[in-house]
Amino acid sequence: MRGLCEALPGLISSFLPKDDEYSVIWALRNFGGDPFVLLVSIVLSQNTSDSNAIRALRNLLEMGLTSPQRVLSSSDEELVDAVRVAGQYSSRVKTLRELARFFVSNPDFVVSICRDVGKTREALLGIHGVGEKTADVFLSVYCEASSVFPVDRHIMRITSRILGRKVSYREASDFWLSCARSVGLPSVYKLHVFLINMGRRLCRPRDPNCTSCPFRNHCSYASLRQYGPAASNEPGSSSQ
Ligand code: SF4
């Protein structure tokens, strides 16, 4: 995979993500470095489009529900009204409240978030509704941590196709972390966004555009396709 890793700095240097296509980037630009809002934006982006997540965030902003205290003092109806557009609103409201409770009951958390990334990750994973991807996106953005690599469904699919087998979250994360380290990539989050963009535009769930893909010479799936139609039991297909 050396060739694939070596291609990354050039690919990423010319990639400029638009902030309205990525809710986390939108939140960063509009709320600066507020860790609570950043986590909320990541929770809102789970299993929905970025445009819906941004709409829900805008609603929270307009309703003044962007602090842990305001989230805790608001009614379920208010929160549901704000986040309904992102879908799965009952579980999202529950997670927002859990997050708010965590921030309020751990007042030192904000000042110590980046001191020990492993410890913070563990604490975040203990909050209802916060999974590995949410914790790793947060740490890679807020702390610019280079010890975590967030993996979403697009990155899971790309990695499974490249390696020719279904991979776990940990395997996919380690694969890209090791690739990023081997070529000294300064930002794992930028690689994360680049790969999501690739998954949306080229390595689509159906009919991936391998001929235009910069990874085609290093990809098991593309290599198989040269010899015939894609196999129906494509690796990683069940992770969509
Ligand atoms: S070569 Fe094809 S299957 Fe492989 S990563 Fe690129 S688009 Fe996906």
Image (tube, rainbow, N blue to C red):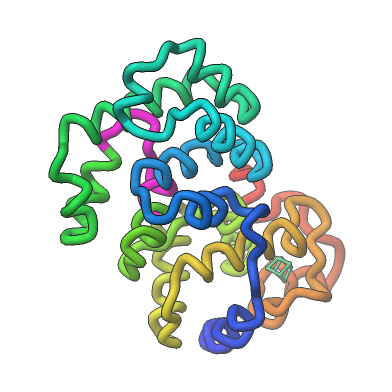
Taking the image as shown, residue 201 lies to the left or right of residue 20, namely right
Q: Position of residue 166 (x, y in %)?
A: 55, 54
Q: Nearer the viewer, residue 150 or 59?
A: 59
Report the label total: 0
Q: Vertical placement of 135 versus 71: above or below?
A: below
Q: Vertical placement of 139 versus 189: above or below?
A: above
Taking the image as shown, residue 174 lies to the left or right of residue 51, namely left
Q: Nearer the viewer, residue 196 or 179?
A: 196
Determine the quadrant in which ligand 1 lies: bottom right
Taking the image as shown, residue 147 lies to the left or right of residue 78, namely left
Give the residue at x 32% y 20%.
72
Q: Position of residue 129 (x, y in %)?
A: 39, 31
Q: Vertical placement of 77 versus 57: above or below?
A: above
Give the residue at x 44% y 74%.
187
Find out whether residue 130 is within the magenta segment: yes
Find out whether residue 128 is within the magenta segment: yes
Q: Vertical placement of 66 versus 29: above or below?
A: above
**Residue extending furthest toward the right:** 228
Q: Position of residue 48 (x, y in %)?
A: 63, 37
Read off the magenta span. 126-136
Give the residue at x 60% y 68%.
194
Taking the image as shown, residue 21 lies to the left or right of residue 150, namely right
Q: Nearer the viewer, residue 55 or 148?
A: 55
- Where is residue 170, by image quadrant? bottom left
Give the residue at x 40% y 21%.
94
- Where is residue 81, by image quadrant? top right
